[in-house]
Amino acid sequence: MTDTAMEEEIAKQTAVVEVKAWLDAGLGTPARILGLAIALLLLGRYVGGKPTFPRALAAASVGALPWAVRSFIEAAALWRQERVLPGDLADLVAAGIPLDSDNPILARLLSSIDLFSLWSLVLFGFGLAAAAGIGRLKSFVTVTISFLLLILVSPGAP
């Protein structure tokens, strides 16, 4: 492969990454917030609360604020890069907690927790308590257990 062809391929892959990032921000995020609102509604009813859909949607929207901040930081980092390959996008904003473990389950949990997910957990804990009318302790325990179970059953890396 010539240098020109390689440069064109890298430019094409960079454009694809940028378009996917914009589509994810424009279509994927609202769909995730809607799905999360439904999950909070069902979760709140499961633990004995009386949530309404508007309150669950508000809690989901506030809980998604860290996603928006992370996306903004990624967009700024992406904009500053001359070339970005698809595999490099996840490493633009690394906010993980540097803890290692020999246990594969614990390693998976630790690799999934970063500053943005912890921030979201706190917001979802307060949001579920307000949306479902349950105590904060019950809400935080419910949200934390749900988050850990979601990590454990989701396929692949976080």
Image (cartoon, rainbow, N blue to C red):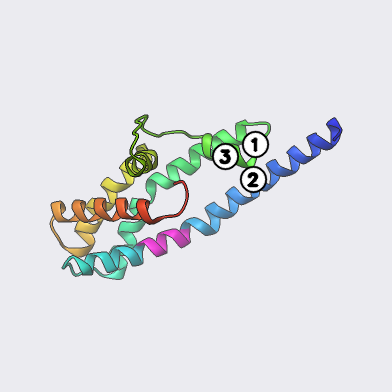
Q: Residue at x 41, y 55 (%)?
A: 154
Type of amino acid at the residue the image marks with label 2: Val
Vertical arrangement, residue 112 with respect to residue 60, above or below: above
Type of amino acid at the residue the image marks with label 1: Val
Point out the tag, 2 or 1, that comes first from the N-terminus. Answer: 2
| Left or right: 45 as drawn, with respect to 112 | left
Question: Percent from the top left, x then y, of residue 149?
Answer: 31, 54
Question: In what element is the residue under mark 2?
Answer: helix
- Magenta residues (range): 30-36
| Left or right: 130 as drawn, with respect to 32 | left
| Left or right: 105 as drawn, with respect to 7 | left
Is the residue under label 2 in contact with that under label 3 (CB below 8 Å)?
yes
**Camera-side residue of 129 and 139:** 139
Q: Which residue was labeled with disc 1?
A: 84
Question: Percent from the top left, x then y, of residue 17?
Answer: 64, 45
Q: Which residue was labeled with disc 2?
A: 17
Question: In what element is the residue under mark 3?
Answer: helix
Q: Residue at x 24, y 58 (%)?
A: 128
Q: Residues within 10 Å of mark 1 (few under 14, many from 20)?
A: many
Question: Percent from the top left, x then y, of residue 70?
Answer: 45, 41
Question: In what element is the residue under mark 1?
Answer: loop
Question: Percent from the top left, x then y, of residue 79?
Answer: 61, 36
Is the residue under label 1 in contact with that under label 2 (CB below 8 Å)?
yes
Label 3, label 1: how far apart the Cα atoms are = 7 Å
Quadrant location of the N terminus? top right
Is the residue under label 1 in contact with that under label 3 (CB below 8 Å)?
yes
Q: Residue at x 47, y 62 (%)?
A: 31
